[in-house]
Amino acid sequence: MPIPASIQHQDNKSVIIVGGGWSGLACAITLANQGIKVHLLESARQLGGRACRIQFKNFLSGQNIDNGQHIMLGAYHSTLSLFKLLGIDEADIIERQPLDLNLFSPSHSSIRLKAPTLPAPFHLFFALMNIQGLPLNERISAIKMSLKLAVNHFSLKQDLSVSELLKKHQQSPIVIQTLWEPLCLATMNTPSQYASAQVFLNTLKDSFSRNRKDSDLLFFKNNLSAIFSDPALEFISQHKGQVNCAAKVIELNIRSSENHLLSSENPIYDFMITTADTSYQSHTVVLATPPHISEQLLHSKNNLSILEKKSFLKPENASLNFNYEPIYTVYMQYPPSVKLPSKMVGFFDTIGQWAIDRSLCRQDGLIAMVISGSGKHTQIPHNQLADLIHKELKVCIPDIPECLDFRIITEHRATFSCSVNIEQQRPQNSTIIPGLYLAGDYTNTRYPATLEGAIKSGINAAKQIINRNAS
Ligand SMILES: Cc1cc2nc3c(=O)[nH]c(=O)nc-3n(C[C@H](O)[C@H](O)[C@H](O)COP(=O)(O)OP(=O)(O)OC[C@H]3O[C@@H](n4cnc5c(N)ncnc54)[C@H](O)[C@@H]3O)c2cc1C
């Protein structure tokens, strides 16, 4: 696309980061902390990407809610360390709860999985042994499977679906329905029929095999922007970085520098990044955009001549063409006295999957019901869906009064589909073009699409830039 003459040109000495989700912000913070100048361009009017606050004027008197209800696990060490770097005290923003899950169903007695205060992984085995609501033989089969997986370091010779893994380990339909399927959906947002067993095991390994606190559930006490993007913006600005919101990048032009011919072994590139009104030149760019956007920016006609039809990605068989899974967050507003039996409760044999009590964020009476993955709920009109969720909540709050109001937030591309062999598709942070990096939850972090995966990826991209500058 030719650049219009009205566009200002800036020769930029900064690392340019395109995309201000948690990954782009993590990258900017890590670089800025090392004294490297950063310039972040974000297309939306606010930072945070998929994990940000939103507001409806006529819902909850205009209070902020989240784009989607999020929780974290104790195993999210990179995210917790980054909060520390921003000067945030964990206790101020997070309510930590040792693993204790209550799952309700209209058709089955409730299930409770509670980890005792034992060192890992014994806390897991005792938690499984003592599951309330499951017969002893079912509990033993779940322990046997966990033991076998632990002995093999939670590693598979070949990836298969979570369903196939469970079948191989002779898990019965009831233990799948009440335990493994809810865990699979909660951690990977992908149904067990095609979810990658290896990525599921990576999550189990990190959460259950090292430190007991890694399996803690971490609940935010404020909206997601107040938790991360506001302090991140402050940190980047204090470290002389620049952040522009409402700055959608429309073109990335990869150019080999003039002295390229002098050193054809190690060609040098620079990058022209163009928004609606400005074009920036830089030697280092991080695309922290969702993969389909990165694909569009990389594979413009101009850049294809640089590539000569090879791939930009490492490894060469990686791809930016992911399938996606939706997440629905149904916010149900009740009188302030209404409370869930615990901060988070699960459901099975229902449409709703996990309900979180937003009294955590001083929003008494507000319940966020999360529905992960695709399913029949996507075909149901919103008012009927809210009615169904209300009925399902009655299973754990029998005397729940009428709902005062509701809002449903649908994210159709909430996460990449974490399907079998996905690890072979995920690209590294570095590309074959020196100075050009990728960041985002979809890169090869071993994690499913999570805040931790996004943060890890942003930090890794930054570390590679720091190492390159040092060499
Ligand atoms: C509803 C929902 C619930 C979730 N629940 C959880 C949870 O409980 N726990 C958990 O760990 N994870 C959860 N996740 C996943 C988590 O939110 C994501 O993994 C994480 O936010 C991804 O961050 P990212 O920076 O990689 O990508 P993104 O957040 O997608 O950031 C990409 C950024 O690039 C910007 N951008 C796009 N195009 C351009 C352009 N052309 N120019 C400039 N900027 C551009 C976008 O606006 C965006 O800000 C959930 C996600 C959703 C949607």
Image (cartoon, grey):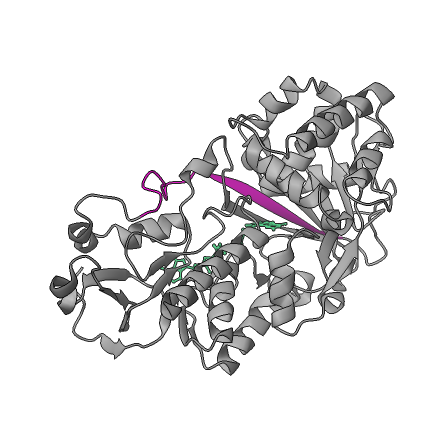
Number of callouts: 0
Image location of residue 60, percent across then percent down: 69, 62
**Left or right: 119 with respect to 333?**
right
Viewer-proximal residue, 125 or 343? 125
Q: Residue 172, relative to residue 255: is it above or below?
A: above
**Left or right: 66 with respect to 45?**
right
**Left or right: 366 with respect to 413?**
right
Q: Which residues are magenta?
A: 313-333
User: For the view shown, which residue lies furthest in the front direction?
Assistant: 471
Image location of residue 315, percent across then percent down: 35, 43
**Left or right: 416 with respect to 297?**
right
Q: Could you tell me which quadrant the C terminus lies in? A: bottom left
Q: Residue 211, relative to residue 15: is it above or below?
A: above
- Find out whether residue 328 is within the magenta segment: yes
- Find out whether residue 83 is within the magenta segment: no
Viewer-proximal residue, 155 or 289? 155
Q: Could you tell me which quadrant the N terminus lies in? A: bottom left
Query: Residue visible at 43% across and 42% down?
Result: 426
Query: Residue visible at 61% across and 71% down?
Result: 85
